[in-house]
Image (cartoon, rainbow, N blue to C red):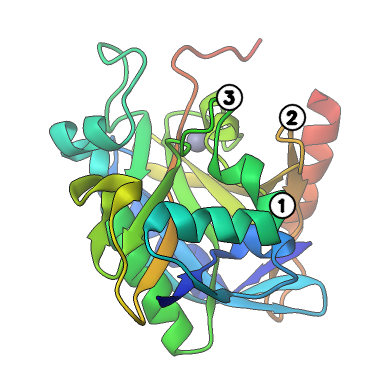
Amino acid sequence: MALRLTQGHIDSIAAHGAQEYPNECCGAMLGVEVDGAKEVRQLAPLRNLRHDRARAEELLPLSEPEKESEKNRFLIDPEDMLRVERDARKRGLDVVGFYHSHPDHPARPSRYDREHAFPWYSYVIISVEAGKPGTYTSWTLQEDRSEFDQELIEVLGVNVPQGATAIAESRRQG
Amino acid sequence: MAVKVIIPTPLRQYTEKRDAIELEAGTVAEALAGLTSKYQGLRKHLYNEEGKLRSFVNIYLNDEDIRYLQKDQTPLNENDIISIVPSIAGGQNLQCICS
Ligand SMILES: [Zn+2]
């Protein structure tokens, strides 16, 4: 399934990533499923709950707390998630996926991303190098949870060179 | 009690695309048992091998996380709404494993 969004959405994700640098940013994408694609209608930037160590640890403990922090981990507060889902439903939208940044790391999903993902959702990753937003990609988890597949990103009304380049790169890297 | 369970988008493929399921139950545990016996594909996404609720899954009764109520033994009232809320988490590789 392709992910459709506008250049404005991409700019907002990039700005959020730059604003939170050197920490990871995160947010939800609300939209609808049309013609076999997920179409984003609105973004909901959310707080990275890893800033609140005690509460985050209670919800989803870290395995290497000396290495893991808001700089390389994000967690969405289920309270925020519940609020966002309700808000979406009221307006006939669904949560179609999430975005997060990789500060000074490539826009490719980590093993931790895969272990914590759900099928169907789109996971957009944007790389932020030295504070500047760079490449972005989108991924969906396979049903058996074994792998992420890269998803085509369609920028509404524009033919997207980024998506095509990113896919070609991922094939090359295997 | 007649209650409603709200299904998040990734799990709707197991509920015939329905976003909410109405059923009769006296506790949260009974509601989830009723739900997973009707839609068996949901089971492995809600429970681990030991039959415990998965840590990536949060259950809310109306506005409250059931962790802070009586967990799955929390009693239900007529027209309660149970929400299955996924924990969304991720990050990046701790060491760069790029060659
Ligand atoms: Zn990540």
Residue picked out by circle 1? B40
Q: How many marks?
A: 3
Q: Chain of mark 1?
A: B
Q: Earlier in the sequence, mark 2 or mark 3?
A: 3
Cα–Cα gap, marks 1 and 2 = 21 Å
Residue B4 falls left or right of residue A115: left
Q: Residues within 10 Å of mark 2 (few under 14, many from 20)?
A: few
Residue A41 falls left or right of residue A79: right
Label 3 sits on a secondary structure element that is helix
Residue picked out by circle 2? A146
Q: Where is residue B44? Give x, y as percent.
A: 65, 40
Q: Chain of mark 3?
A: A
Cα–Cα gap, marks 2 and 3 = 10 Å
Q: Which mark is residue A111?
A: 3
Is residue A45 in sight in this rendering? Answer: no
Is residue B37 in sight in this rendering? Answer: yes
- Give the position of the N terminus of chain A as an image quadrant: bottom right
The kind of residue on which mark 2 rests is Ser
Q: Which mark is residue B2?
A: none
The residue lying at 51 percent from left, 27 percent from top is A112
Cα–Cα gap, marks 1 and 3 = 28 Å
Q: Chain of mark 2?
A: A
Label 2 sits on a secondary structure element that is loop
Q: Which residue in the rendered view is the most extreme toward the bottom? A: A91
Q: Where is residue B71? Give x, y as percent.
A: 29, 46
The residue lying at 78 percent from left, 34 percent from top is A170
Label 1 sits on a secondary structure element that is helix
The kind of residue on which mark 1 rests is Gln
